[in-house]
Amino acid sequence: MASWDDLVSFVRVRYEIMRQVESELWFNLPTSGDRTQIVAVRMVTGEDGHPWAQITSPVGLAADIDLGTMLALAGESIVGGAIATDGLVLFRHSIPLGDTALDGFDRSFRVVVEVADRLEHELTGADEH
């Protein structure tokens, strides 16, 4: 069972933190080849009133992406989904904090960034995020 503080400590030991605010961490994860992907994890309150870790990774600018294709490709993933916010398309997945052991987060981080990186590559051909 993980708390937000446990998750912050877990991430700090494993990854170089790029940015941290009260309930949000940003860090880079390597993907395929020499590509990297930004990942953000935030503590949010779910519809159930309990704390969740929301994991996001950018795909690209909404104006530069065929959103219909994006949704179709994102729909192939077993977890997560696509969102657009502030003109940016993100791949996002959430995990309940109190119900998840710390080692379960690393796998979720990797799945989110691998899907986001694949989508970014397929839809934009770039490695900007």
Image (cartoon, rainbow, N blue to C red):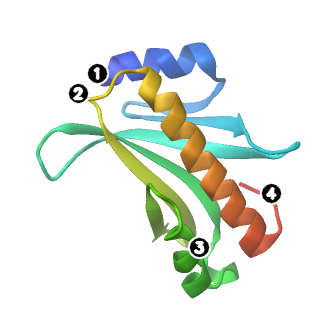
In the image, what residue occupies the spot 70% across and 46% down? 37
Q: Report the Cα–Cα distance between label 4 and label 1.
A: 33 Å
- Residue 117 sits above or below residue 1 on the image: below
Q: Report the Cα–Cα distance between label 2 and label 4.
A: 34 Å
Q: Report the Cα–Cα distance between label 1 and label 3.
A: 33 Å
Is the C-beta separation of discs 4 and 1 under 8 Å? no
Residue 19, picture quadrant: top right
Q: Nearer the viewer, mark 2 or mark 3?
A: 3
Question: Does label 1 or label 3 sit earlier along the sequence?
Answer: 1
Q: Position of residue 43 (x, y in %)?
A: 33, 37
Crowdedness near tag 2: few (<14), some (14–19) or many (≥20) residues, C-alpha within 10 Å: some
Q: Position of residue 53 (x, y in %)?
A: 35, 38
Is the C-beta separation of discs 1 and 3 under 8 Å? no
Q: Report the Cα–Cα distance between label 2 and label 1.
A: 6 Å
Q: Quadrant of the N terminus?
A: top left
Residue designated by label 1: 3
Q: At numbered mark 3, what does the secondary structure look like: helix, strand or loop?
A: helix
In the image, what residue occupies the spot 57% across and 68% down? 88
Q: Is residue 72 left or right of residue 32?
A: left
Question: Does label 2 or label 4 sit earlier along the sequence?
Answer: 2
Residue designated by label 4: 127
- Residue 81 sits above or below residue 73 on the image: above
Kind of residue indicated by mark 2: Gly
Image disc number at residue 98: 2
Q: Report the Cα–Cα distance between label 4 and label 3.
A: 18 Å
Q: Nearer the viewer, mark 2 or mark 4?
A: 2
Residue 69, picture quadrant: bottom right
Q: Report the Cα–Cα distance between label 2 and label 3.
A: 31 Å
Residue designated by label 3: 73
